[in-house]
Image (cartoon, rainbow, N blue to C red):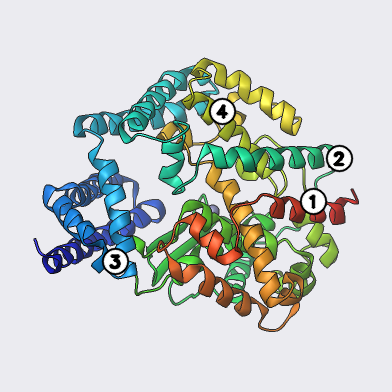
Amino acid sequence: MTVEQAKQHYTETMAKVDALDYATSLLHWDMDTIAPKKGQAVRGETIARLSGEVFALTTSEAYGQTLDALWENADRLDSILHRSVAVARRDYEKDKKIPQDLFEAYTLAQSASNNAWKEAKAQNDFALFRPHLEKLIGFSKQFVELWGFEGHPYNALLDNYEEGMTVELLDGIFPPLRDATAALVGKIGAKEPPIKPIISAGKQEQIGHYLLRTIGYDLEAGNLFTTEHPFESRIHPHDVRVTTHYYEENPFSSLFSVLHEGGHGMYEQNVSDDLPGNLHSGASLGIHESQSRFWENMIGRSRAFWETQFTPLSAIAGVGLGTDAEDAFRTANHTAPSLIRIEADELTYNLHVIIRYELEKAIFSGDIAVDDLPGLWNEKYLEYLGVSADTSAQGILQDMHWSAGYFGYFPTYSLGNLYGAQFAVTLQKELGSLDSLIRAQGGFSKIRDWLTEKIYRYGKLETPSQILQRVTGEPLNSRYFIDYITAKMADLYGI
Ligand code: ZN
């Protein structure tokens, strides 16, 4: 096969995969939003069939030969194609290492586990989920052996969600973050929850649209919808939809969900169209989360945001979002140790993630068994957050990740916070303080343009650590987030 033939075959395969992915994403979107109940089964089968087509295309012998032919001539590929082929080879080799029958058995175990988890959570009974969890951990341990790893076995799983991430790196990053956060949580103590205004779903929807327009999300390349759990759905960079949920007694919930999902959405909308299919989306879960949390927390939960947005937001709502801007700013930043990760505030959130990281790491190093998990879960919550769950539904059964076998996923949430704070330091060196940008006319577009120029447009052209190094000039460092959150808590709570 000549290089030209290989390039042509590669481009054709990529175009087919793109089309199938596009269709699958739309089917998923429809299933997660408006599909009627009776349509679910056939929808699931169709998605499985289309995904099977993608799997067949990208694991075929012919495709493997094409990738080899291109890689043997790597010096003749331009930098974009070079990276695209490198990513494709990495995926190809990982997929090829898992025997088909093992993968099928795993898929079956996953769906059985998910059902058992739902039942266990509803009945508050970890014992119902326990054998399934053990089984999925067993599969993941087999995958780790088949894929191979350097250093800690858990590295092979981390790498699935954040390319290049390792235990060695995280063990340098998470302990200082954990200790600094736990110390702040202890100093702040328990505070009375704030009183929130009641705002109708219709008004909250208007607020959602206003916020998306304000931050620069392109409403001609996406829109805002309602679902039980907020999410962002990238069908294509020209079609990136976001959803939210309206609680009339807690309007802040939707407001911050919209900023969060809008942050994810803007990232996808601004990935360069020059990139081929397998690079044509956000770099990684961690980098993605850095963008959603940047807009949600570093912008939306800042004093400057509330001092400038309190009046327009209250005008749309027809009622004040607090007694004044300062009151709304404090409500938005209410901090308290809690049991549920997805309801946790900006300060305590990382502790929930670090607990899961420490447990997963110990599982995959073989230091602990499944039966140790509930006890260790409660011990760590008590030690780091000072709270412990009365029920397993509020404790170890709260997240769906383990029920689906997503081991190695959790750390990306906290990585997002750390990357975001590190990017923000560079952004402020180059554009001036976030405070002044948020208060200035046109400040949000300056911020968005900077992020597009430095991060968004690159898609997956670089690894997460390459992006961080290029943008900030140094590797990941948790000091920036620790400094940021310490200063914020000092301001809010006088500690
Ligand atoms: Zn997110």
Q: Disc number at residue 359?
A: 4
Q: Secondary structure at mark 3?
A: helix
Give the Cα separation between the discs numbered 3 and 4.
39 Å
- Mark 2 or mark 3, earlier in chain: 3
Q: Is residue 461 above or below residue 151?
A: below
Q: Secondary structure at mark 4?
A: helix
- Can residue 39 be seen at all in this image of the molecule? no
Q: What kind of residue is marked 3? A: Leu
Give the labeled residue for mark 2: 187
Quadrant in the picture for residue 411: top right
Q: Secondary structure at mark 2?
A: helix
Query: Which one is in front in this view, the residue at disc 1 or the one at disc 2?
Result: 1
Q: Nearer the viewer, residue 221 or 316?
A: 221
Query: Which one is in front in this view, the residue at disc 1 or the one at disc 3?
Result: 3
Q: What kind of residue is marked 4? A: Leu
Q: Secondary structure at mark 1?
A: helix
Q: Is residue 74 above or below residue 103?
A: below
Give the labeled residue for mark 1: 486
Q: Disc number at residue 81?
A: 3
Classify mark 2: residues with Cα within 10 Å, few (<14), some (14-19) or many (20+): few
